[in-house]
Image (cartoon, rainbow, N blue to C red):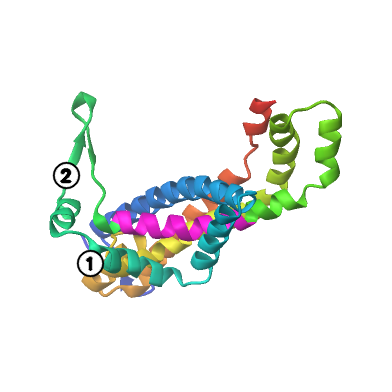
Amino acid sequence: MTPPSWLGHSWLEPHYLGWLLKGALLTAWLALLVIFAASLLGILLTAWQDSRWRPLAWAGRLFVSLHRNTPLMVQLLLWYFGVAGLLPDELKFWLNTPRALALPLGLSLPWPSFEFLAAFTALTLYSASFICGELQAGLNAVPAGQRLAARALGMSAWQTLVLVVLPQAWQYARRPLLGQYTAVVKNTSLTMAIGLAELSYASRQVETETLLAFQAFAVATLLYLALVLATQWLGHRPDPIWRALR
């Protein structure tokens, strides 16, 4: 059967679309892990910067400044090539050997490749520095009178933080944080530079195999758009966290 044509060119065959879909799934998985880990690290960095112990506060500020003011591409290359050069040969061999973790019911969980680990580490550290800034801005936006009023009502410091300060800070920081989360999805495209077979890498492979550059990158663009829109949709869902705490 002659494949359908689009704008005078052959459309991508199903197995090439499968490559792109597989790359999109890896992109989504990496972005999800980075968002979760970077959010936790961002909260920790925010606490560090507000610490009364100066060395800890300085360490937090230095970490944020270092990662926010250097290119993400350089950080990716540093973790993949630089750190790899410092590891013992035995450890490098172990990290690059395919393996899987056995699970019940005959299932298995593949061990992530060194490319995935390097990408995850670099993206997490980079994204956490920006998430920390958004969280800090949200906390600073809460009027000091809210804390004083809560303490005057007899609330403890923990109750004041959880029931009064954090819900308001979350509303201030929620939209900027959503922007950072969508940026994580888009920043995963840079990991093709270290050989991670995510969506950008897959689209480049398809283009090389088929010479159908427009079709390959058009499908990749639509898949990136779908991932970003899904992230934004989830970010605008009603948040049950503070209701549960109350």
Question: In this rendering, would 181 be left or right of 8?
Answer: right
Q: Is residue 148 visible?
A: yes
Question: What quarter of the picture does the N terminus occupy?
Answer: bottom left
Instruction: Tell me which amino acid carries mark 1.
Output: Gly
Sequence order check: which comes first, mark 2 or mark 1? 1
- Estimate the x, y position of residue 161 in percent, counting from the top left: 71, 36
Residue 123 falls inside the magenta stretch: yes
- Estimate the x, y position of residue 2 in percent, counting from the top left: 23, 63
Disc marking residue 99: 2
Question: In this rendering, would 78 be left or right of 173?
Answer: left
- Estimate the x, y position of residue 41 in percent, counting from the top left: 50, 48
Disc marking residue 85: 1
Residue depicted at x 16% and y 49%: 98
Distance from label 2 to label 1 (Cα)? Answer: 22 Å
Q: Nearer the viewer, residue 61 or 210?
A: 61
Please state the extent of the stretch shown in magenta in the rendering: 116-133
Q: Nearer the viewer, mark 2 or mark 1?
A: 1
Q: Is residue 223 visible?
A: no
